[in-house]
Each structure stands twice: as C-alpha cells, then as structure tokens.
Image (spheres, helix red, strand yellow):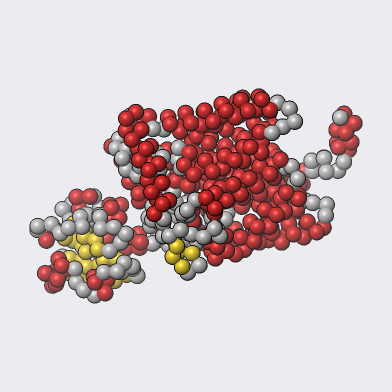
Amino acid sequence: MLKARLAALGTRSAVPRPGGTFVTLGAWGAAGALALFATFYGLATRYWFIDERIYRRAGRLYVEQHQFLANPQHPPLGKYLIGLSQLAFGHSEFGARLPSALATLVTGVLLALLVARAVGQVPALVTFVAWTLLPHPGRSDDISRLAYLDTIMVAFLAFALYAAWRWWESNSWKWAIAVGAGWGLAVATKVSALFVLPALAVLLFQKDGFGRRAAQLTAAAVTGCAVALATYIPFGAHAAERVIEWMMGFQYAHARHGHRVLLAGHIYRFPPWWAQAGWLWHDNRAATIVMASSLVLAPFLVPRRISVFLLVAVLAPAAIFAFVSPILLWHWMYDWMPAMAALIGIAIGVALTSMSWKYRFVGVALALTLVFLAGNYVRSVVDLRPTGYHSIESELATVDHPGNVVLKYGGPDNTAFDLSLYFDFARAEHTAPADTTQVAAVVVSTNWPSPYAHGVMPPVVASHPAAFRRWSHPGFIVWFRRH
C-alpha cells in the first residue's frame, strides 16, 4: 500500500499544479456567478404559474392563520416554507418563490459535493452546471424558479443521496440517520419522493457487515417516518390523522379517474408509458440526447457503485411513473432529475479527462452541447419580461386607492386572488358593489374565453358607458373609470 501511494505521488497527475488549481477555481467562480444570476434574477417577473397560487395560499393560511385544511392532498413541509418566506418577505411572487430558488441552488451544491467525493472535481463542476443552468425537467415551463413543491422536495432528496453515499463509505450510524432524515423531509414535502428509495438497495450489500447495514437502514426508515409525521404536529393529532387519510384517498381517486395532459398533440387522461421521453424529446431534443448519452456512458466510464446507485435513482422512479402509476404530470420527472444531473456530470467530466481520445471526443461534443443549452437558458432569464397582471401593473397602480374596487373577468378562476398582489381583498372583488361608482377599473383577460374578451362590455360598463374609457394591452382589455 505504501509503495503504491509513493508511486502515485511520483506521477504527474497526482501533483497539484497551480495553474490547474487557478483554472478550476475560476471555472467554479464563473459557474457559481451564473447560477446565482439564473436562479434569482427577475424571480418575481413572471406571473403566477398554475399551482403556484394554490401553494402560496396554503402556505399563508398555515403560517399566518394556522388553518391547515388548504391543499390537503400534499404533505405540508413545502407549504410551511413558502408561508414562512411570505411572512418574512411579503406576499409577492418573490416571497413565495424564494424557498424554491434557494432549494434549486442548494440541490446543485449537494449534487456537486456528492460527485466530487465519489468521482472528482471536474465531474462535480459539470454536475453543478447541469443542474443550475439547465431548465428542468427540460421544458420551457421551467419550475426551478417557481413556488412548486417538487422544487423544494429535490433539495431534501439531494441531501439524502449525499448522506446515503457517506453512509456507504463510512458504515456510520450518524449518516444512516441523516439518510432517513433527508428522505423523511422529502416525503414531508411530496410523497413521490418515496420512489427514489430503491436506490438504497444498491448501497446495502457489501462483502461484510450486512447485518449492521440492515440495522442502520431500518433505523433510517424509522427516522424518516418520524420526521415526516413530525411535520403534522401543528395540525393536532386528530386533524393530522384525518388529513393524512384524506390525502391517501385523494391520491387513489386521482389515479383511478386520471388526469388530462397534453402529449404529442393529443390529450391523454392516462398517458402512455413513453410519456416522459415524449415530453423531453418534444421540448428539448438536445437535452434529451445529453441525458440518454449520459445514462449509457456513465457506467462504462466509472464502473463503480456510484454509477449503479445513480442509475437506480433515475430509472426506479422513471419506471414507476411509466409502468405503475396510471397518471403522470410532466413535472413529476423532477423526482429523478437530481440523479440525472449527477450522471451527466460524471459522463461529461470523466470523458473530458479520459486518456482515450474516443471518450474525449464524445466528452467534448456533450460538453459543447451542455454549454449551448446553458447559454440559451441564461439568455432566456436575461430576456424575462413582465407577464400576466405584471404587464399592466403600472396602469392598475393609478387606481389603487382606498375605497376603489377592481373587477376581474376571465382567468383560471373567478376570484380576486389574482389581483390581490396589487389590491387589498376589500378593494378587489369579483361581484359588483351596490354603489357602482366604487368600480375604478374592470379588467378583462382576453386569454380566456368570454364574451367580454371579444368586445362585449361588462355589465357595470354597459350600464354606464360614458363613465369608462377603454384601454387595451396584449392579453387584457381594461375599462378605467373617467375622473
């Protein structure tokens, strides 16, 4: 052993070179700066996206009013964090999305630490770039910057993956408990985190110490269950039991009745087994090629336990979604995306530093593709422009005065919740007040089918046409009361 170490120290590759260290630090600095920019720049620019409003409202009710019946179909931890962020930073998109943005950054750091420990620094750097500078899961509707539970869940999953590798290295009770805590926190955010558990089976079997590792894994499972259940303590024992039972019943009914999704130009209530590949290929073919290449290359380049561990962490949940779960939504692929980013990092990083020119050629091709994709993603963040009600925020602000009422027609619901970012609930009602002179503006969304989106005057305006002036903006028609 001593001779081997001395021989290694005599090799050129084992001696750290100042120039190489400087280049590595510079690359990490550039990647970190771009990741910070891509994660936090214009975080509040985009308007609420689908389920964000649900989690935003639930988080507020949980934390501010201690009402825990909102959105009971998902565990509460992610909504706690969204609610706490709003309590600290306000009820804006920034306040609601900050936990997800931080979770995205933390996930990248944890994945880089895992790959650096198991493989090396260059693969770790590529892993960090693959996670923080690519849209996930390869769609234009990137949720890495949105207030989604999946985005928060994967940060805990990344910690669990890192802790699991440390457990395999050390055979330590401390890291076994950390594995359980990480997975428990992930499950307490979204139940689908359970689907990554089969990856632990890869780390269970060793040449010796099976009994000790089995006991540690049992302790990890108990810890995970305890941590997940502990997040329900604010509900109270009776309410927690009722909510958990309702959640399981909802998920069963949801799976049985199906969920409509768009795939390859068709609407499916029960998507086909190839749905994940179909979404990825349709939305970003270059990213799909990088993923598929990494799945094939990583086991050949690094024929070690780490490759099998990460492969199972990708393929197990993907297979469950494809062949077991009757329903599937595109963002559920987030379950296996952290391990996929690590495999991309390993495949490209090891190929680039390989002694084989064939592997180096493939590594350069994949690296250039990754740089191209990352550049496009950063550019898309730079080009962010206000959407939804943000695009008419300045005009609406002119009538934001006490006693004024703003009516809204169209949109995903018929409540005043969409406008509550700019107007108090008392001044943003859907139904017209008895005194119509209180109506300062009527906002019509032309993106949703209604007669008012095609030129018909809303009732309040039609009853007093001379009292309002019409103003148009892409996506909106606004009737302002004349002064």
The answer to whether residue 92 is seen in the rendering is: no
Q: How many marks?
A: 0
Residue 220: give x, y in percent of width and height.
Answer: 56, 29
The image quadrant where one finds the C terminus is bottom left
Percent position of residue 4, x then y: 88, 33
State the residue at coordinates (69%, 48%): 346
Quarter of the image where one finds residue 49: bottom left
User: Taking 130 as reference, is 75 left or right?
Assistant: left
Q: Position of residue 279 (x, y in %)?
A: 53, 61
Q: Position of residue 294 (x, y in %)?
A: 68, 54
Residue 30 lies left or right of residue 12; in this view the side is left
Displayed quadrant of residue 460? bottom left
Query: Vertical placement of 461 versus 205: above or below?
Result: below
Asked which quadrant contains residue 428, the reply is bottom left
Residue located at (79% from left, 51% from top): 354
Nearer to me, 209 or 185 = 209
Q: Quadrant of the N terminus?
A: top right
Q: Residue furthest bottom?
A: 455
Q: Residue at x 32, y 33 (%)?
A: 239
Image-based side of 31 in relation to 324, left or right: right
**In the image, residue 51 above or below residue 476:** above
Q: Residue furthest front?
A: 256
Q: Residue at x 57, y 51 (%)?
A: 319
**186 w.r.t. 122: above or below:** above
